[in-house]
Image (cartoon, rainbow, N blue to C red):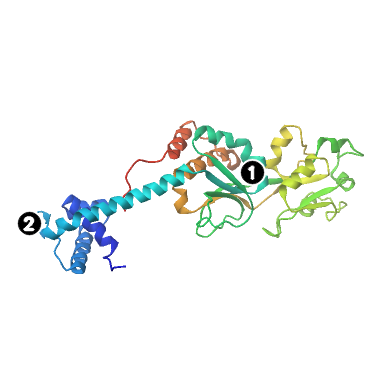
Protein backbone atom coordinates (compact mmCIF):
# COMPACT_ATOMS: atom_id res chain seq x y z
CA UNK A 1 0.00 0.00 0.00
CA UNK A 2 1.35 3.42 -0.95
CA UNK A 3 2.29 5.78 1.86
CA UNK A 4 -0.53 8.24 2.51
CA UNK A 5 -0.53 11.61 4.28
CA UNK A 6 -2.05 11.85 7.77
CA UNK A 7 -5.84 11.74 7.81
CA UNK A 8 -6.06 14.90 9.93
CA UNK A 9 -4.16 16.89 7.33
CA UNK A 10 -6.48 15.63 4.58
CA UNK A 11 -9.49 16.51 6.71
CA UNK A 12 -8.11 20.02 7.30
CA UNK A 13 -7.45 20.46 3.57
CA UNK A 14 -10.93 19.28 2.58
CA UNK A 15 -12.65 21.60 5.04
CA UNK A 16 -10.44 24.59 4.17
CA UNK A 17 -10.83 23.95 0.43
CA UNK A 18 -14.60 23.73 0.73
CA UNK A 19 -14.92 26.93 2.79
CA UNK A 20 -11.87 28.69 1.31
CA UNK A 21 -11.25 29.81 4.87
CA UNK A 22 -9.00 28.47 7.61
CA UNK A 23 -11.23 30.06 10.26
CA UNK A 24 -14.43 28.39 8.95
CA UNK A 25 -12.61 25.06 8.68
CA UNK A 26 -11.38 25.47 12.26
CA UNK A 27 -14.92 26.13 13.49
CA UNK A 28 -16.23 23.05 11.71
CA UNK A 29 -13.49 20.78 13.07
CA UNK A 30 -13.49 22.39 16.52
CA UNK A 31 -9.81 23.38 16.40
CA UNK A 32 -7.92 26.67 16.07
CA UNK A 33 -7.13 28.34 12.71
CA UNK A 34 -3.47 27.90 13.60
CA UNK A 35 -3.97 24.15 13.84
CA UNK A 36 -5.60 24.12 10.39
CA UNK A 37 -2.72 26.13 8.95
CA UNK A 38 -0.20 23.74 10.50
CA UNK A 39 -2.02 20.69 9.10
CA UNK A 40 -2.10 22.24 5.62
CA UNK A 41 1.61 23.06 5.84
CA UNK A 42 2.41 19.45 6.82
CA UNK A 43 0.32 18.16 3.91
CA UNK A 44 2.08 20.49 1.45
CA UNK A 45 5.46 19.31 2.75
CA UNK A 46 4.36 15.70 2.40
CA UNK A 47 3.15 16.24 -1.18
CA UNK A 48 5.95 18.68 -2.00
CA UNK A 49 3.47 21.05 -3.65
CA UNK A 50 1.58 24.22 -2.70
CA UNK A 51 -2.15 23.69 -2.30
CA UNK A 52 -3.29 27.20 -1.35
CA UNK A 53 -2.37 30.71 -2.31
CA UNK A 54 -2.44 32.85 0.81
CA UNK A 55 -3.69 36.33 -0.06
CA UNK A 56 -4.23 39.28 2.28
CA UNK A 57 -7.73 38.46 3.47
CA UNK A 58 -8.48 35.13 1.82
CA UNK A 59 -7.08 31.90 0.49
CA UNK A 60 -7.58 30.26 -2.90
CA UNK A 61 -6.68 26.85 -4.23
CA UNK A 62 -3.64 26.57 -6.47
CA UNK A 63 -3.87 24.56 -9.67
CA UNK A 64 -2.53 21.57 -7.74
CA UNK A 65 -5.07 22.20 -4.97
CA UNK A 66 -7.93 22.32 -7.49
CA UNK A 67 -6.76 19.02 -8.93
CA UNK A 68 -6.43 17.46 -5.47
CA UNK A 69 -9.72 18.73 -4.02
CA UNK A 70 -12.40 16.67 -5.90
CA UNK A 71 -11.10 13.16 -5.08
CA UNK A 72 -10.40 14.12 -1.44
CA UNK A 73 -13.90 15.61 -1.04
CA UNK A 74 -15.39 12.55 -2.68
CA UNK A 75 -13.42 10.30 -0.35
CA UNK A 76 -14.72 12.01 2.79
CA UNK A 77 -18.24 11.87 1.38
CA UNK A 78 -17.84 8.13 0.91
CA UNK A 79 -16.52 7.83 4.47
CA UNK A 80 -19.67 9.54 5.68
CA UNK A 81 -21.92 7.26 3.63
CA UNK A 82 -20.11 4.20 5.00
CA UNK A 83 -20.50 5.35 8.60
CA UNK A 84 -24.15 6.20 8.07
CA UNK A 85 -24.77 2.83 6.43
CA UNK A 86 -23.21 1.06 9.40
CA UNK A 87 -25.28 3.11 11.84
CA UNK A 88 -28.47 2.36 9.92
CA UNK A 89 -27.66 -1.35 9.87
CA UNK A 90 -27.08 -1.26 13.62
CA UNK A 91 -30.42 0.41 14.15
CA UNK A 92 -32.36 -1.61 11.57
CA UNK A 93 -31.39 -4.98 13.05
CA UNK A 94 -32.99 -6.43 16.18
CA UNK A 95 -32.18 -5.00 19.59
CA UNK A 96 -30.34 -7.83 21.31
CA UNK A 97 -30.58 -7.89 25.11
CA UNK A 98 -28.71 -10.29 27.37
CA UNK A 99 -29.86 -10.95 30.94
CA UNK A 100 -30.44 -13.71 33.45
CA UNK A 101 -33.53 -15.89 32.89
CA UNK A 102 -35.15 -14.90 36.20
CA UNK A 103 -34.90 -11.17 35.49
CA UNK A 104 -36.23 -11.64 31.98
CA UNK A 105 -39.20 -13.80 32.96
CA UNK A 106 -40.19 -12.06 36.21
CA UNK A 107 -39.52 -8.40 35.45
CA UNK A 108 -38.63 -7.61 31.85
CA UNK A 109 -41.14 -9.64 29.83
CA UNK A 110 -44.24 -8.38 31.70
CA UNK A 111 -43.19 -4.83 30.75
CA UNK A 112 -41.62 -5.37 27.33
CA UNK A 113 -44.88 -4.66 25.50
CA UNK A 114 -44.55 -1.04 26.63
CA UNK A 115 -41.25 -0.70 24.79
CA UNK A 116 -42.77 -2.21 21.65
CA UNK A 117 -45.59 0.33 21.80
CA UNK A 118 -43.04 3.16 21.83
CA UNK A 119 -40.72 1.62 19.23
CA UNK A 120 -42.84 -0.82 17.19
CA UNK A 121 -40.29 -0.88 14.34
CA UNK A 122 -37.54 -2.27 16.63
CA UNK A 123 -37.46 -6.05 16.81
CA UNK A 124 -36.17 -7.50 20.08
CA UNK A 125 -34.02 -10.58 20.60
CA UNK A 126 -33.32 -11.79 24.15
CA UNK A 127 -30.33 -13.88 25.19
CA UNK A 128 -30.98 -15.44 28.63
CA UNK A 129 -27.53 -15.96 30.02
CA UNK A 130 -25.25 -14.99 32.90
CA UNK A 131 -22.10 -15.59 30.85
CA UNK A 132 -19.51 -12.93 30.19
CA UNK A 133 -20.30 -11.14 26.93
CA UNK A 134 -17.82 -9.56 24.52
CA UNK A 135 -19.85 -6.60 23.27
CA UNK A 136 -17.19 -5.75 20.70
CA UNK A 137 -17.22 -9.16 19.01
CA UNK A 138 -20.72 -10.49 19.64
CA UNK A 139 -24.02 -9.34 18.22
CA UNK A 140 -25.20 -8.10 21.62
CA UNK A 141 -26.43 -4.52 22.05
CA UNK A 142 -27.10 -4.20 25.76
CA UNK A 143 -26.92 -6.29 28.92
CA UNK A 144 -28.78 -6.19 32.23
CA UNK A 145 -26.45 -7.59 34.83
CA UNK A 146 -26.62 -8.19 38.59
CA UNK A 147 -23.43 -7.24 40.38
CA UNK A 148 -21.40 -4.45 41.93
CA UNK A 149 -21.65 -2.18 38.90
CA UNK A 150 -17.93 -2.30 38.12
CA UNK A 151 -17.55 -3.24 34.46
CA UNK A 152 -14.31 -1.81 33.02
CA UNK A 153 -14.55 -0.14 29.61
CA UNK A 154 -18.35 -0.42 29.56
CA UNK A 155 -20.97 2.27 30.05
CA UNK A 156 -22.87 1.30 33.20
CA UNK A 157 -26.18 2.69 34.45
CA UNK A 158 -27.61 1.79 37.86
CA UNK A 159 -31.15 0.43 37.69
CA UNK A 160 -32.17 -0.82 41.14
CA UNK A 161 -31.41 -3.04 44.10
CA UNK A 162 -33.85 -5.12 46.17
CA UNK A 163 -34.57 -6.89 49.45
CA UNK A 164 -34.93 -10.61 50.07
CA UNK A 165 -38.27 -11.66 51.53
CA UNK A 166 -39.57 -15.09 52.60
CA UNK A 167 -42.32 -16.40 50.31
CA UNK A 168 -44.18 -19.63 49.71
CA UNK A 169 -47.25 -21.03 48.02
CA UNK A 170 -50.57 -20.28 49.78
CA UNK A 171 -51.31 -24.01 50.00
CA UNK A 172 -48.20 -24.46 52.13
CA UNK A 173 -49.84 -22.42 54.88
CA UNK A 174 -52.63 -24.96 55.07
CA UNK A 175 -50.34 -27.93 55.63
CA UNK A 176 -49.48 -29.16 59.13
CA UNK A 177 -49.05 -26.37 61.66
CA UNK A 178 -48.82 -23.67 59.02
CA UNK A 179 -46.52 -20.69 59.34
CA UNK A 180 -47.85 -18.55 62.15
CA UNK A 181 -44.48 -18.04 63.88
CA UNK A 182 -40.96 -17.84 62.48
CA UNK A 183 -40.02 -20.90 64.51
CA UNK A 184 -42.55 -22.84 62.40
CA UNK A 185 -40.00 -22.73 59.57
CA UNK A 186 -38.28 -25.73 61.19
CA UNK A 187 -41.29 -27.79 60.07
CA UNK A 188 -40.92 -26.73 56.43
CA UNK A 189 -38.38 -27.20 53.66
CA UNK A 190 -36.12 -24.22 53.04
CA UNK A 191 -35.39 -23.49 49.39
CA UNK A 192 -31.87 -22.18 48.72
CA UNK A 193 -29.82 -20.72 45.90
CA UNK A 194 -26.10 -20.03 45.86
CA UNK A 195 -24.67 -16.75 44.61
CA UNK A 196 -21.19 -17.56 45.88
CA UNK A 197 -19.76 -17.26 42.36
CA UNK A 198 -20.98 -13.63 42.28
CA UNK A 199 -20.63 -12.66 45.94
CA UNK A 200 -19.61 -15.08 48.73
CA UNK A 201 -21.35 -12.75 51.21
CA UNK A 202 -24.70 -12.71 49.41
CA UNK A 203 -27.60 -12.85 51.94
CA UNK A 204 -29.05 -16.30 52.50
CA UNK A 205 -31.29 -18.17 54.93
CA UNK A 206 -28.62 -18.30 57.66
CA UNK A 207 -28.31 -14.50 57.59
CA UNK A 208 -32.07 -13.96 57.53
CA UNK A 209 -32.66 -16.36 60.44
CA UNK A 210 -29.86 -14.75 62.43
CA UNK A 211 -31.33 -11.30 61.81
CA UNK A 212 -34.73 -12.37 63.18
CA UNK A 213 -33.27 -14.36 66.08
CA UNK A 214 -34.53 -17.78 64.92
CA UNK A 215 -31.85 -19.97 66.52
CA UNK A 216 -33.98 -23.12 66.43
CA UNK A 217 -34.22 -23.32 62.60
CA UNK A 218 -31.47 -25.22 60.79
CA UNK A 219 -30.44 -23.09 57.79
CA UNK A 220 -28.26 -25.84 56.33
CA UNK A 221 -31.18 -28.11 55.41
CA UNK A 222 -33.49 -28.01 52.42
CA UNK A 223 -33.34 -28.04 48.61
CA UNK A 224 -30.54 -26.23 46.80
CA UNK A 225 -30.69 -24.73 43.30
CA UNK A 226 -28.13 -23.16 40.98
CA UNK A 227 -30.64 -21.10 38.99
CA UNK A 228 -33.02 -18.47 40.34
CA UNK A 229 -35.87 -19.35 37.99
CA UNK A 230 -35.86 -22.90 39.38
CA UNK A 231 -36.06 -21.48 42.90
CA UNK A 232 -39.11 -19.42 41.89
CA UNK A 233 -40.80 -22.42 40.34
CA UNK A 234 -40.18 -24.58 43.41
CA UNK A 235 -41.77 -21.91 45.62
CA UNK A 236 -44.77 -21.60 43.29
CA UNK A 237 -45.20 -25.38 43.30
CA UNK A 238 -45.32 -25.51 47.09
CA UNK A 239 -42.00 -27.31 47.54
CA UNK A 240 -40.95 -25.08 50.46
CA UNK A 241 -40.20 -21.54 51.59
CA UNK A 242 -37.79 -19.40 49.57
CA UNK A 243 -36.02 -16.10 49.99
CA UNK A 244 -36.81 -14.16 46.83
CA UNK A 245 -36.19 -10.65 45.59
CA UNK A 246 -39.14 -8.50 46.59
CA UNK A 247 -39.08 -6.84 43.16
CA UNK A 248 -39.69 -10.16 41.43
CA UNK A 249 -41.93 -11.78 44.06
CA UNK A 250 -44.39 -8.94 44.68
CA UNK A 251 -46.30 -9.40 41.38
CA UNK A 252 -46.78 -13.08 42.28
CA UNK A 253 -47.95 -12.05 45.76
CA UNK A 254 -50.43 -9.55 44.31
CA UNK A 255 -51.74 -12.27 41.98
CA UNK A 256 -52.20 -14.64 44.93
CA UNK A 257 -49.73 -17.23 43.66
CA UNK A 258 -47.29 -16.55 46.50
CA UNK A 259 -47.65 -15.25 50.05
CA UNK A 260 -45.18 -13.54 52.36
CA UNK A 261 -45.66 -15.17 55.77
CA UNK A 262 -43.24 -12.84 57.61
CA UNK A 263 -42.50 -9.15 57.06
CA UNK A 264 -38.79 -9.26 57.89
CA UNK A 265 -36.50 -8.65 54.90
CA UNK A 266 -32.80 -8.51 54.11
CA UNK A 267 -31.33 -5.73 51.95
CA UNK A 268 -28.98 -6.77 49.12
CA UNK A 269 -25.91 -4.63 48.47
CA UNK A 270 -25.49 -5.68 44.83
CA UNK A 271 -27.82 -4.33 42.18
CA UNK A 272 -29.05 -4.53 38.61
CA UNK A 273 -27.21 -2.45 36.03
CA UNK A 274 -27.64 -1.73 32.35
CA UNK A 275 -24.34 -2.19 30.51
CA UNK A 276 -23.18 -1.58 26.95
CA UNK A 277 -20.23 -0.07 25.12
CA UNK A 278 -19.90 3.72 24.74
CA UNK A 279 -20.22 3.23 20.97
CA UNK A 280 -23.40 1.14 21.13
CA UNK A 281 -24.90 3.49 23.70
CA UNK A 282 -25.21 6.08 20.91
CA UNK A 283 -27.17 3.75 18.61
CA UNK A 284 -30.76 5.07 18.54
CA UNK A 285 -32.47 1.77 19.41
CA UNK A 286 -30.15 1.28 22.39
CA UNK A 287 -30.68 4.86 23.56
CA UNK A 288 -34.44 4.36 23.29
CA UNK A 289 -34.33 1.13 25.31
CA UNK A 290 -32.17 2.81 27.97
CA UNK A 291 -34.63 5.70 28.36
CA UNK A 292 -37.57 3.33 28.52
CA UNK A 293 -35.87 1.03 31.05
CA UNK A 294 -34.92 3.93 33.31
CA UNK A 295 -38.51 5.13 33.24
CA UNK A 296 -39.90 1.67 33.99
CA UNK A 297 -37.54 1.15 36.93
CA UNK A 298 -37.85 4.69 38.35
CA UNK A 299 -40.22 3.56 41.12
CA UNK A 300 -37.60 1.11 42.39
CA UNK A 301 -35.11 3.98 42.80
CA UNK A 302 -37.69 6.11 44.58
CA UNK A 303 -37.97 8.47 41.62
CA UNK A 304 -41.24 9.90 40.28
CA UNK A 305 -42.35 8.44 36.95
CA UNK A 306 -41.55 10.49 33.87
CA UNK A 307 -44.36 12.27 32.08
CA UNK A 308 -45.61 11.41 28.60
CA UNK A 309 -42.92 13.61 27.06
CA UNK A 310 -40.44 10.82 27.72
CA UNK A 311 -42.35 8.68 25.21
CA UNK A 312 -41.63 11.25 22.52
CA UNK A 313 -37.95 11.33 23.45
CA UNK A 314 -37.67 7.57 23.21
CA UNK A 315 -39.66 7.48 19.98
CA UNK A 316 -37.31 10.02 18.40
CA UNK A 317 -34.32 7.96 19.55
CA UNK A 318 -35.74 4.97 17.69
CA UNK A 319 -35.66 6.80 14.38
CA UNK A 320 -32.49 6.62 12.23
CA UNK A 321 -31.00 10.03 11.49
CA UNK A 322 -30.76 11.41 7.96
CA UNK A 323 -28.03 13.90 8.85
CA UNK A 324 -24.82 13.42 6.86
CA UNK A 325 -21.86 12.11 8.81
CA UNK A 326 -18.46 13.61 8.08
CA UNK A 327 -15.23 11.90 8.91
What is the CA distance from the residue labelled 2 to the residue labelled 1?
67 Å
The spot of residue 112 in percent (x, y) is 58, 37
Q: With respect to residue 243, does 109 lie above or below?
A: above
Q: Is any atom of residue 32 visible in this view?
A: no
The spot of residue 124 in percent (x, y) is 55, 41
Pointer 2 or 1: first along the chain: 2
Q: Taking 154 as reference, is 54 left or right?
A: left
Determine whether the residue tagged by mark 1 lies in a helix, strand or loop. Answer: helix
Q: With respect to residue 52, does 1 lie above or below?
A: below
Considering the image in quadrants, where does the N terminus appear? bottom left
Q: Quadrant of residue 61?
A: bottom left
Q: Which residue is mark 2?
A: 56
Q: Which residue is mark 1?
A: 104
The spot of residue 311 in percent (x, y) is 48, 33
Residue most extreme to the front: 1
Q: Nearer the viewer, mark 2 or mark 1?
A: 1
Amino acid sequence: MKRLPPLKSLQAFEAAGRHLSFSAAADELNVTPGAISQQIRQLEEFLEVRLFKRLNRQIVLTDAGQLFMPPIASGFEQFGHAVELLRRQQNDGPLTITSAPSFVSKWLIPRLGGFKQICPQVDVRIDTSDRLVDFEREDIDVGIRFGDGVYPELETIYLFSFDLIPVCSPKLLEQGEGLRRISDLKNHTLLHISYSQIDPGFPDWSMWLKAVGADDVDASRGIFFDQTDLLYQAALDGQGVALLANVMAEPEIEAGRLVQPFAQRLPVKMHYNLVTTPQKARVPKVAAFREWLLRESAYLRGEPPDDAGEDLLALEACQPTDAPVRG
